[in-house]
Amino acid sequence: MWKRGKRGRPCEPLPLELCDLCGATFPEDEAVRGYVPDSSCVHPTNDWFDGLRRVTACGAAHFAVVRDEYRRRDFVPEELWAAKIDRALTGGTPVMTLEELGRRTGLHEPEIRRAVAWHNARRRQQSQL
């Protein structure tokens, strides 16, 4: 049951955020946010943010820990390219040629081939586990 405010109207829910490090919830206006490099992350609509992950923390100390964790992680260009290809292949009209895929992703043919090879090797590794 919703708590009632003055005059019998329901209270507005407080917008909450979730800390990416500790999982604590806190008011949205107290969030510390920023972008960290992450080759597994592509933005669904704006390729300007490809390779960047937005993180949220409950304070500057937790943000610094999350940022440092991502700094220690390898940035793998082929992983980013594979994610761009996946976005192009799963959205909109089907891609027919390497040239069209290149236009949609901004990648050149050698990058596309390296991304596909990386993706296939990764799938083989996962299937062996």
Image (cartoon, grey):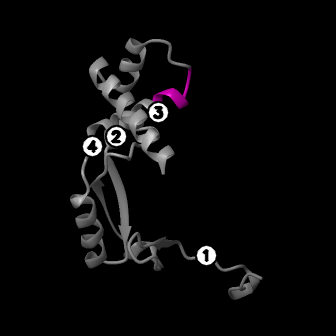
Q: CA distance from mark 1 to mark 4?
A: 41 Å
Q: CA distance from mark 4 to mark 3?
A: 16 Å
Q: In the rendered structure, does residue 38 fall within the stretch colored magenta?
A: no
Q: CA distance from mark 2 to mark 4?
A: 5 Å
Whether residue 114 sits left or right of residue 25 in the image: it is: left
Q: In the rendered structure, does residue 92 fall within the stretch colored magenta?
A: yes
Q: Nearer the viewer, mark 1 or mark 4?
A: 4
Say whether marks 2 and 4 touch (CB < 8 Å).
yes
**What numbered label is drawn on residue 86?**
3
Find residue 54 and report its image quarter.
Answer: bottom left
Say whether marks 4 and 3 touch (CB < 8 Å).
no
- Residue type highlighted by circle 2: Glu
**What numbered label is drawn on residue 13?**
1
Q: Which residue is mark 2?
A: 79
The earlier-in-sequence mark between 2 and 1 is 1
Quadrant placement of the N terminus: bottom right
In the foreground, 14 or 102: 102
Q: Which residue is mark 4?
A: 76
Q: Residue at x 47, y 71 (%)?
A: 17
Magenta range is 87-93
Q: Residue at x 66, y 80 (%)?
A: 11
- Residue type highlighted by circle 4: Val
User: How many neighbours does mark 3 have within 10 angstroms: few (below 14), some (14-19), or many (20 or more)?
Assistant: few
Whether residue 80 sits left or right of residue 91 in the image: it is: left
Q: CA distance from mark 2 to mark 1?
A: 39 Å
Q: SS class of the residue under badge 2? A: helix
Using the image, determine if residue 42 lies above or below residue 26: above
The earlier-in-sequence mark between 1 and 3 is 1
